[in-house]
Amino acid sequence: MKISELEFHVIAYLAEHPDREGYGWAITKWLKEQLALKVALGSVYRKLAALWEKGLVERRLGEPHESVAGCERHYYKLNPAGYDAFRMACQDMKKLMERLRRSIEGGERGLGVHERVG
């Protein structure tokens, strides 16, 4: 199953923190601080919901919390299908990085995507 770039980063957070459940605000904070991503909290919430709908994460409804105006906080944890999707995405990324490395070492040959200008 293919996942988007933001879904990849959200899953990376959950994979890096397997001992605890993640929630939108904490994940957004980590993405901004650790990966220097410019991402809105609402975007992370939508990706978490999408990952849950795809069956890649488990979701648990918590107790009402004062930081979310008394609303219940949703907690997420990566499940085996999520780990599999993450592994596949990492393998795809590894292949891309290898192609880029070869392209850089090969000079003009490139990836075959762009014509040489000049």
Image (cartoon, grey):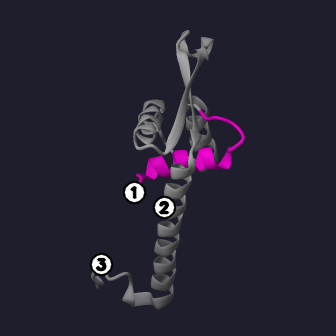
Which residue lies under the disc numbered 2?
A: 89
Which residue lies under the disc numbered 3?
A: 114
Q: Nearer the viewer, mark 3 or mark 1?
A: 1
Amino acid residing under circle 2: Ala
Task: Identify the secondary structure beneath mark 2.
Answer: helix
Which residue lies under the disc numbered 1?
A: 2
Query: What is the spatial separation of the Cα atoms under label 3 and label 1, in whole angstroms?
Result: 25 Å
The stretch in magenta equals 1-22
Point 64% across, 35% down: residue: 21
Query: What is the spatial separation of the Cα atoms under label 2 and label 1, in whole angstroms?
Result: 7 Å
> Quick one: label 2, few (<14), some, or many (20+) residues within 10 Å?
some
Q: Earlier in the sequence, mark 3 or mark 2?
A: 2
Image quarter in which the C terminus is found = bottom left
Amino acid residing under circle 1: Lys
Task: Identify the secondary structure beneath mark 1.
Answer: loop
Q: Nearer the viewer, mark 3 or mark 2?
A: 2
Asked if 98 appears above or below 58 in the picture, the reply is below
Amino acid residing under circle 3: His
Query: Does 10 appear in magenta?
Result: yes
Specify the quadrant of the image occupied by residue 75. Answer: top right
Is 69 left, or right, of 114 in this rendering? right
Specify the quadrant of the image occupied by residue 17. Answer: top right
